[in-house]
Image (cartoon, grey):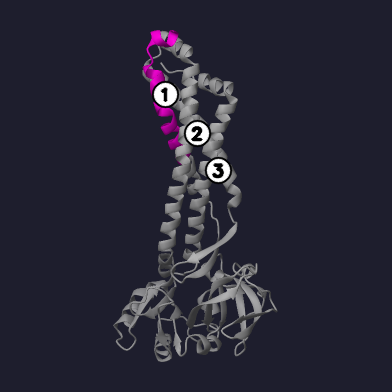
């Protein structure tokens, strides 16, 4: 025979202050837990959205990032001549030899510098990366000292408004426009013409060649052709897989912080639940004796008190989810450890993260309620009556 749930509900209502404080403590822990996971998820998705399965990145053999790569002009021309590459609206191959250099720029707040990727691209880059859209102003003009700035990083830089002049590499560059790319890491970069940027940043070497294939199924064939050509000494990577792999270090750091910080807070919340439930047991010894006298078995008493603690934590879990929801979409920035540059991205709260927060709250409730519940179940009837 089980103890009715209404008994536990009435018990919680009789202790409004302690019940509320316990639920609030759990809610704060769950909110922080969700925020940390949303931070890691937002960073991961920014990199995942950067790549396309139809695109190939060609880097120097052995290079694990664009920053450490180098491709000569001659090799870039050989790569662009592959028959598997798609052609653009002008009939030219969709191949974009690119320069990739992190530059130190003045922050908008005036409180220091930000290390921002400056990417030199060809005219074909806007067809190779089909998610890039000009949202303000226009594209940079060929042959001129003009750049466009990603919409995520522009508010964080000084002199980044359309029409302003931003200074780096000893020259001034007219900001021709701002662009978006579906929330990808490109929105944290500055783009200009590769022929303008390469001589002053990297000499006569590109860092990477981006290709759009006629079909994603041609990747294995292109990879084999490029890597078997001894003249080139390059590696071919599917763009979507390459950028997804760039989040490894920071993702581990953020996940560790999520576990470490919320773990410390969870210990406090669990002790709060333990104190609340022990106080409930101490104040209801007479009720426990009556329940045992009426024939309720000790395991029913254990289940009843454990359910009460779990329900209290579950309420806190739902409150924590509600508190954390408004952070979804808030833009923040951090350092991309693969390029040591600033990357701006949004907190991303998903149903899965909310579910993990609810499960986390239930675990705290079970841990906080088990020992008080066991004490209530093992209490001798005679002692409880006294």
- Compare marks 2 and 3 and give the one earlier in the sequence: 2
Characterize the local packing of mark 3: few (<14), some (14-19) or many (20 or more) Cα atoms within 10 angstroms. Answer: many
For residue 136, what is the image quadrant? bottom right
Query: Quick check: 167 left or right of 274?
Result: right
For residue 190, what is the image quadrant? bottom right
Q: Which residue is mark 3?
A: 321
The magenta span reads 359-386
Return the residue found at the far right: 163
Residue 169 pos. (x, y %): 56, 84
The reply to whether discs 2 and 3 touch (Cβ–Cβ < 8 Å) is no
Q: Residue at x 58, y 75 (%)?
A: 105
Residue 364 pos. (x, y %): 45, 36
- Compare marks 2 and 1 and give the one earlier in the sequence: 2
Which quarter of the figure is the N terminus placed in?
top left
Give the secondary structure at mark 2.
Answer: helix
Q: Which residue is mark 1?
A: 373
- Compare marks 3 and 1 and give the one earlier in the sequence: 3
Characterize the local packing of mark 1: few (<14), some (14-19) or many (20 or more) Cα atoms within 10 angstroms. Answer: many
Residues at marks 2 and 1, CA–CA distance in whole angstroms = 15 Å
The reply to whether discs 3 and 1 touch (Cβ–Cβ < 8 Å) is no
From this view, report whether residue 73 is shown above or below residue 290. Answer: below
Q: Which residue is mark 2?
A: 313
């Amino acid at each position: 025979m089980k103890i009715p749930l209404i008994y536990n509900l009435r018990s919680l209502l009789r202790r409004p202050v302690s019940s509320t404080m316990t639920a609030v403590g759990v809610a704060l822990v769950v909110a922080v837990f969700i925020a940390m996971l949303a931070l890691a998820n937002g960073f991961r998705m920014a990199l995942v959205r950067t790549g396309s399965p139809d695109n190939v990145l060609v880097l120097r053999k052995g290079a694990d990032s664009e920053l450490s790569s180098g491709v000569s002009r001659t090799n870039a021309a050989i790569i662009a001549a592959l028959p598997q590459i798609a052609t653009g609206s002008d009939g030219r191959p969709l191949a974009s030899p690119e320069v990739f250099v992190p530059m130190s720029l003045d922050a908008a707040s005036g409180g220091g510098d930000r290390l921002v990727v400056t990417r030199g691209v060809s005219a074909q880059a806007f067809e190779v990366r089909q998610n890039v859209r000009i949202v303000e102003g226009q594209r940079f003009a060929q042959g001129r000292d003009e750049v466009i700035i990603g919409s995520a990083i522009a508010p964080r830089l000084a002199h980044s408004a359309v029409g302003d002049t931003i200074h780096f590499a000893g020259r001034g560059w007219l900001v021709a426009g701002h662009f978006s790319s579906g929330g990808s890491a490109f929105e944290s970069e500055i783009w200009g013409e590769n022929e303008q940027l390469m001589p002053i940043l990297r000499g006569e070497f590109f860092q990477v060649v981006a290709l759009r294939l006629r079909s994603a199924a041609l990747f294995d064939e292109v990879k084999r052709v490029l890597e078997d050509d001894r003249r080139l000494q390059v590696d071919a990577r599917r763009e979507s897989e390459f950028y997804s792999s760039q989040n490894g270090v920071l993702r581990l750091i953020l996940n560790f912080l999520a576990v470490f910080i919320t773990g410390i807070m969870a210990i406090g919340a669990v002790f709060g639940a333990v104190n609340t439930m022990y106080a409930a047991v101490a104040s209801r010894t007479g009720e426990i004796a009556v329940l045992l006298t009426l024939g309720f078995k000790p395991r029913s008493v254990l289940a009843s008190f454990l359910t009460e603690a779990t329900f209290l934590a579950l309420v806190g879990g739902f409150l924590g989810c509600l508190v954390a929801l408004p952070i979804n979409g808030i833009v923040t920035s951090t350092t991309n450890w693969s390029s040591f540059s600033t990357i701006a991205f949004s907190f991303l709260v998903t149903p899965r993260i909310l579910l993990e927060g609810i499960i986390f709250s239930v675990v705290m409730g079970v841990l906080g309620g088990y020992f008080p519940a066991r004490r209530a179940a093992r209490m001798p009837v005679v002692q409880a009556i006294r």
